[in-house]
Amino acid sequence: MPKMKRSSTAKKRFRWVASGTAIKRSKAYRRHILTKKSSKRKRQLREVAYVSPMEKRHIERMMPY
């Protein structure tokens, strides 16, 4: 049985937390057109977000280990 590969797109976008209980992700809307966004909004977009429990099941299938 060959080893199961992880999704290349998922490994670029998501990281497991050290305990393995949750999956971290970055927030959207922080790439470009930043001049019109307030400093507060840009600062909040820097914070780490966590994948919701419903989406976590799908991402776990893409990242089996």
Image (tube, rainbow, N blue to C red):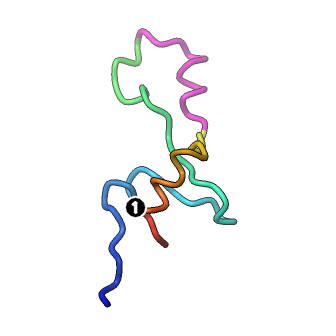
User: Which residue occupies 64% across, 65% down?
Assistant: 20
Position of residue 50 measured from the top left corner of the image (x, y, whole percent)? 60, 44
Question: What's the residue type where badge 1 is placed?
Answer: Met
Left or right for 35, reference 38: left
The front one of 6 and 25 is 6
6 above or below 30? below
User: In the rendered image, which quarter is residue 7 located in?
Assistant: bottom left
Check disc 1 and report the residue beneath it: 62
Percent x, y of residue 17 = 62, 59
x and y, in percent, of residue 48 in the image: 59, 41
In the rendered image, residue 10, in percent from the top left (x then y), is placed at 38, 55
The residue positioned 32% from the left and 54% from the top of the image is 9
Does 4 appear above or below 58?
A: below
33 falls in the magenta region:
no
- Predominant secondary structure in magenta? helix
Direction bottom: furthest residue: 1
Name the quarter where the N terminus is drawn. bottom left
Q: Which span is picked out in magenta?
A: 36-47
Q: How many marks?
A: 1
In terms of depth relative to the viewer, which is nearer, 28 or 53? 53
- The reply, left or right, for residue 20 in relation to residue 33 is right
> Which element type, helix, strand or loop, lies under badge 1?
helix
Q: Note whether 30 is above or below 21 in the view shown.
A: above
49 sits to left or right of 27: right
Answer with the quarter of the image where residue 46 lies: top right
**Does 25 sit above or below residue 39?**
below
Residue drawn at x 54%, y 51% is 56
Residue at 47 percent of width and 13 percent of height: 37
Q: Is residue 12 left or right of residue 22?
A: left
> Few, some or many C-alpha atoms within 10 Å of disc 1 (few <14, some 14-19, many ≥20)?
some
